[in-house]
Image: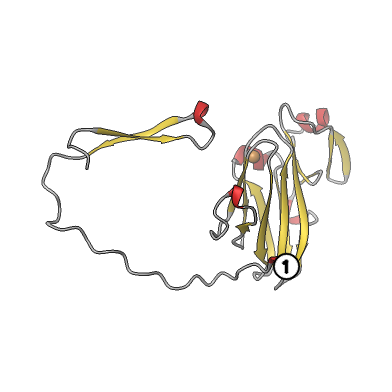
């Protein structure tokens, strides 16, 4: 029970206690409640139709994320040429996935080709000094390591902290060419994006 007029602060400390910031402050109104009694519990949702990964019979893959300030990236492939970090910075493309920097996404070779209908375990390795929320289109995945988050939860984005490595698993049941990219859009636009093909 919170007394009317008592402020409650909402703090976002996802990036650690030293980077916590206040999102909003709210307080309970002095006005009468809208209802005499609270609503009942919500109705149960239908069963989630997303297929559970079969971890014991999975194909394994790896994606490495490189680049940015204070990182170790020395060079990367762009448009079929190996460019130095200096050249990449001058081109405004200083993030890479598996050593490649796409420019025209629809023409680039997929980062991964996933066999349709199978379970795939994908290691995500962040070799940069920056956090990256890595977002995959077309599929929902689970973490395989409970240290990364509740492994029962299906997600479309994995937040990789600096130098963090984790593994995701999914059933590739949605054919097509799907974007995979950092959801910090400046990072996406400057190279941290690619295509995952399911066929
Ligand atoms: Cu990023």
Q: Nearer the viewer, residue 72 or 111?
A: 72
Q: Nearer the viewer, residue 190 or 163?
A: 163
- Residue 111 in view of the camera: no
Q: Nearer the viewer, residue 103 or 94?
A: 94
Q: Quadrant of residue 119?
A: bottom right
Q: Is residue 92 above or below residue 110?
A: above
Mark 1: give few (<14), some (14-19) or many (20+) Cα within 10 Å. Answer: few
Where disc 1 sits, the SS reads: helix
Residue in the picture at 58% in, 56% down:
156
Q: Is residue 103 above or below residue 50?
A: above
Q: Quadrant of the C terminus?
A: bottom right
Residue 21 x, y percent position in the rendering: 44, 29
| Residue 92 falls left or right of residue 160 | right
Residue in the picture at 55% in, 60% down:
152
- Residue 181 in view of the camera: yes
**Residue beneath disc 1:** 56
Residue in the picture at 56% in, 69% down:
50
- How many marks overall? 1
Q: Is residue 46 above or below residue 20?
A: below
Please identify the residue farthest to the right as the structure is shown.
81
Q: Quadrant of the N terminus?
A: top left
Q: Does the beta carbon of the residue at mark 1 sit less than 8 Å from ligand 1?
A: no
Q: Quadrant of residue 138?
A: bottom right
């Amino acid at each position: 029970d919170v007394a009317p007029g008592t402020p409650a602060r909402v703090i976002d400390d996802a990036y650690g206690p030293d980077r916590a910031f206040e999102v909003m402050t709210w307080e309970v109104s002095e006005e009468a409640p809208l209802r005499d009694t609270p609503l009942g519990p919500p109705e149960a949702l239908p069963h989630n139709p997303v297929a559970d990964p079969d971890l014991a019979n999975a194909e394994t893959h790896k994606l490495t994320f490189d680049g940015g300030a204070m990182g170790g990236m020395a060079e990367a492939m762009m448009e079929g040429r190996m460019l130095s970090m200096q050249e990449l910075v001058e081109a405004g493309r200083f993030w890479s996935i598996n050593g490649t920097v796409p420019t025209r996404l629809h023409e680039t070779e997929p980062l991964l080709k996933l066999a349709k209908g199978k379970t795939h375990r994908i290691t995500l390795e962040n070799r940069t000094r920056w956090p990256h929320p890595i977002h995959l289109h077309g599929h929902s995945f689970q973490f395989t390591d409970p240290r990364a988050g509740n492994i029962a939860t299906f997600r479309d984005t994995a937040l990789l902290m600096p130098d963090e490595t984790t593994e995701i698993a999914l059933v590739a049941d949605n054919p097509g060419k799907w974007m995979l990219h950092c959801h910090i859009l400046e990072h996406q636009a400057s190279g941290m994006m690619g295509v995952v093909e399911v066929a």
